[in-house]
Image (spheres, helix red, strand yellow):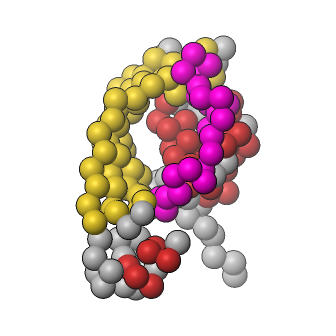
Amino acid sequence: MEKKTECPCGSGAAYASCCLPVINNHRLAATAEILMRSRYTAFVKQHSQHILASWHKTTRPRTLNFDDHPVVWLKLEIHSSRDGLTDDNTGTVHFTSTYMENGHLCQLREVSQFRKEDDLWYYLRGECEVRKEKVARNSSCPCGSGQKFKRCCLRN
């Protein structure tokens, strides 16, 4: 039996039934939190088309270049959501995403604002704070692989 790939968004659901359908069809993001989870997953999978399409036109960058800041995404934790439900037109999602960048363990803590237009949720903007700490080469890798950092994510 084939093992189902768990969705990177941390929902515990299979990727194929969680964020992948939303990445393939933006209309399936019924709430701001669902869109937030799909956008995180799209960053993990480097799916720039979904990221840009789900970014509000007034704040959207022209392009994304994942090579400028290569990171290994480790975890998404949703702290809270306010509004952003099917009958709302605005919403906020407070989350922390953890990632590795240049040998540093980083945590991006953000309160994101979302807006719904024409029945589609869009990421508008976020207020964020980033914390970085250096990971020792012989420490356990923060990705949870059980390997030493130098033999795991430091190689990426």
Question: x%, y% of residue 137?
Answer: 33, 80
Q: Residue at x 32, y 52 (%)?
A: 107
Residue farthest to the right? Answer: 24
Give the number of marks.
Answer: 0
Front position in the image: 15 or 145: 145
Q: Residue at x 39, y 50 (%)?
A: 97
- Judged by its main secondary structure, the magenta piece is loop
Q: Which quadrant of the structure image shows residue 15?
A: bottom right
Residue 129 counted in the magenta span: no
Residue 72 counted in the magenta span: yes
Q: Residue at x 55, y 36 (%)?
A: 35
Q: Residue at x 54, y 21 (%)?
A: 59
Front position in the image: 39 or 155: 155
Question: x%, y% of residue 23?
Answer: 67, 43
User: Residue 11, relative to residue 113: is it above or below?
Assistant: below
Q: Which quadrant of the structure image shows residue 6?
A: bottom right
Region in magenta = 51-73
- Is residue 45 visible in the rendered image? The answer is yes
- Is residue 85 visible in the rendered image? The answer is no
Question: x%, y% of residue 81?
Answer: 36, 32
Question: x%, y% of residue 57?
Answer: 62, 19
Q: In this image, 17 relative to 109: left or right? A: right
In the picture, which quadrant includes the N terminus?
A: bottom right
User: Residue 61, relative to residue 48: is it above or below?
Assistant: above
